[in-house]
Image (cartoon, coloured by chain):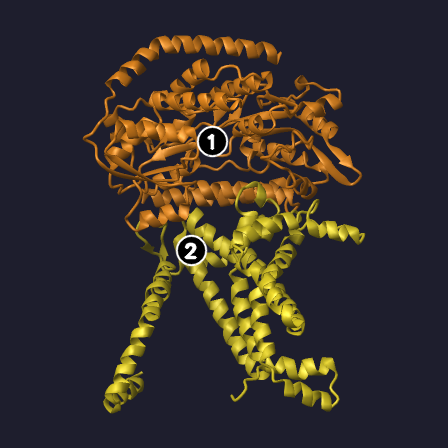
Amino acid sequence: MASNSLVARSFWGRATPLQRREMLAGLGFISPWFIGFLVFTAGPMVISLWLSLTRYDVINPPRYIGFQNYERMLADPRLGTSLFNSFYYALFHVPLAMGVALGLALILVRVGRAAGFFRTAFYLPSVTPAVAIGTLWLWILNPQIGLINRGLELLGIQGPGWTTDPDWIKPGIVLMSLWSVGNTVVLYLAALRNVPPELYEAARIDGANSWNQFRNVTIPMISGTLFFTLVVNTIASLQIFAEVYTMYFGNMTGMSAAASAGLFYNIYLFRQAFEFLQMGYASAMAWLLFVIILILTIFQLRASKRWVYYEGG
Amino acid sequence: MFGSSKSSLRRTLALSALVLLTLVAPVVMAQDAEQEPNTEMTGSLSIMGFGLGDEIATTRVGEFERLYPNVELNFTEGGLDEQQFLTAVASGTPPDLVSLPRAELSTYAVRGALTPLTECIANEGIDMSQYRDVAVSEVTVDGEVYGIPEFFNNIMLIINTAALEEAGLTVDDVNTADWDSIAALNETLTRMDGDTLSRIGFDPKLPEFLPLWVAANGGQMLSDDGRTAMLNSPEVVEALTFAASLHDVAGGRAPFSAFRDTWDFFGSGNMIANDQLGVFPMEQWYMNVLADVSPDAPLAFKPFTDREGNPISFATGSAWAIPRGAANPEAACAFIKTVTSPEAWIAAAEERARLRAESGTLNTGTYTANRLADEVIFGEIVGPTGSDVFDTGVETILSLQENAFAIPANPAGAQFRQAWIDAVNRVLNGEQTVEEALNQAQQEAQAALDEAWAQSES
């Protein structure tokens, strides 16, 4: 820290007037983001850390209770259920979403002129409001008249109770989540287009078939993007909220089958904070999730050294 | 049998209205005459949780605007957004007024988010006896009134008479006093097309109507003082066991829910019009939906009864309250008094009657928590609808109003409700037996109540 400030001071001392002006301009440009980060992200995080050590009902001032909220988490069976549900979802959603997105991107990269149309078509669901997606998929997944079970029926398969059988609630939600892989598709498409064609040419000359080209050229060359989407999708999937809340927690009757099976971590956190007025406990839950995500991300970063290839680095 | 009670009820209502008019009309007229616009009251009122979506809302608000022309009204429309409300309270900028479900009011009141209305009631001379006792009890915490009741919703049986006829039954055969007969009726009316459910015989409306089944069984889920959960009492266990068993004929809750999710609930192809449901207890507002979208559907209405045969209903509704720290509490109090007064309700009901007559649609009335208003509305304004079926519906609702109960006010409303709803879901999903689920719910609910009461008293 001290050495950094020394470096900055020595830079300031050696800098020309033009460099100083440019530095000030740079700091000026970055300041809106920096102030926004302090006010809207760092500040609330610090406050929520404090609140996690209090009993706070949002209406009355918080009262310090030490680590009681964290102790309570250990004995809360619903917290365990919600964590399990979120991990289950992440475990299936992340690889499936990445796989489907990569498959679509590989098709799109070969489509040629029509790629623009399909790119837009695939991206559209990503900009559809989560509430609309939740409502739409309640119908698509309906066991009796939903499109999916109707389709399965044509194949002679009796479809499951996607929205009514607790065992099928989470698979149904995973299926729904694949609807919104458009942004990942766009990222993969950009990465695929950046793979130098001469690498494929060289591989073909060396006798590599399509699979070998994909495995030994495509995957390493887009591994940076794959890693980015792995990290981002893992974080997002552990925080799933709006679609599921709309589908199952908007009214009491809708909750029936999903009361436990669809209780994801952020849904439980939201209910603690704003329905049960347990903001202190909800803050502690938020910090637990933050620590879990941090550990997972550090693990992913370390593991990435083994399989992510960065050109020139 | 019901026909005779129907005409007797009609006579009683007409008589009551006549008596009431004789007694109240001079007072109301005198008040009207006295109620000159008050130009001294000024400022603005921010109002949360209230929509101006129909003439019942706009007419009453218009009445306030006429009486207090210098008070500016700012609405955050729609149902109460708890997140928005709590954020406003926590940041010290609460709205001046909030309209919220009565069942949730005590949760906020005991935590000090709402102002007791003792002073408001005294200063504005609000006569609390005009409001229904059950509704007032829901907004009274530790002897202090925190809200003024607005609407009063009740539950009645809605019956598909075509399904009954097909089975050779009549409305008299729908007897909720005899649970064996409900089970038999359910079995008779349930229809399967091969393996697929095509009509539910009797929908018990779980989990949300468990309190109704419990009360019908002579039990209660919470002590009158709101401190002791009674979720694993024998009455609750028996009520849940029976109500849950009504799903079995349909093959369990999963096919039951899957089928229920396909209904066009608010459309002309609703489950009664489409013969997808035999009988179900439902809130009264659904009668208005049916009157609008399928007035010619084969329908009948009847009170839900306890096992002794007495009509019984689980009442819900909204209330007006003034948040702590409201900037303009005097104007807020005047607003509450005005929009819940008989005069405002009567004006709104007249406007609805006029609009309905203009559009040629049925007027099935507006049901308020103000007894005086209701007696004038249903004695004077809402006449025969032109449909015997809906006339019976109106009379059924009116007959239930004095037989309604509510869950006692308590500071852990949401958690208490969640505990029993989760228990019902665990039973319906086959995760636990009724006893296991209710024992767990009892522990969770009691812990939440103890913590909330301790917090509110410290």
**Can residue A59 be seen by looking at this rendering?**
no
Which chain is represented by yellow in the image? A
What amino acid is found at the position of numbered circle 2 in the picture? Answer: Tyr
Which chain is represented by orange in the image? B
Q: Is residue A235 left or right of residue A49?
A: right
User: In this view of the protein, which residue sits in the foreground, B235 or A285?
Assistant: A285
Quadrant for the N terminus of chain B, please: top right
Q: Position of residue B196 (x, y in %)?
A: 75, 40
Question: Looking at the image, which residue is at 58% across and 83% down?
Answer: A306
Q: Position of residue A180 (x, y in %)?
A: 58, 61
Q: Is residue B174 above or below residue A96?
A: above
Q: Position of residue A44 (x, y in %)?
A: 36, 62
Label placed on residue B115 = none
What amino acid is found at the position of numbered circle 1 in the picture? Answer: Thr
**Can residue B85 be seen by looking at this rendering?**
yes
User: Crowding near pointer 1: few (<14 within 10 Å), some, many (20+)?
Assistant: many
| Element marked by disc 1 | loop
Quarter of the rendering containing residue B250: top right
Name the outermost residue toward the left: B40
Name the outermost residue toward the front: A113
Quadrant for the C terminus of chain B, please: top left
User: In this view of the protein, which residue sits in the foreground, B101 or B68?
Assistant: B68
Q: Chain of mark 1?
A: B
Q: Is residue A245 left or right of residue B76?
A: right
Q: Is residue B49 above or below residue A134?
A: above
Q: Is residue B211 left or right of residue B168?
A: left
Label placed on residue B316 = 1
Spatial CA span between label 2 and label 1: 30 Å
Question: Looking at the image, which residue is at 39% across and 44% down?
Answer: B452
User: In this view of the protein, which residue sits in the foreground, B392 or A297?
Assistant: B392
Label placed on residue A281 = 2
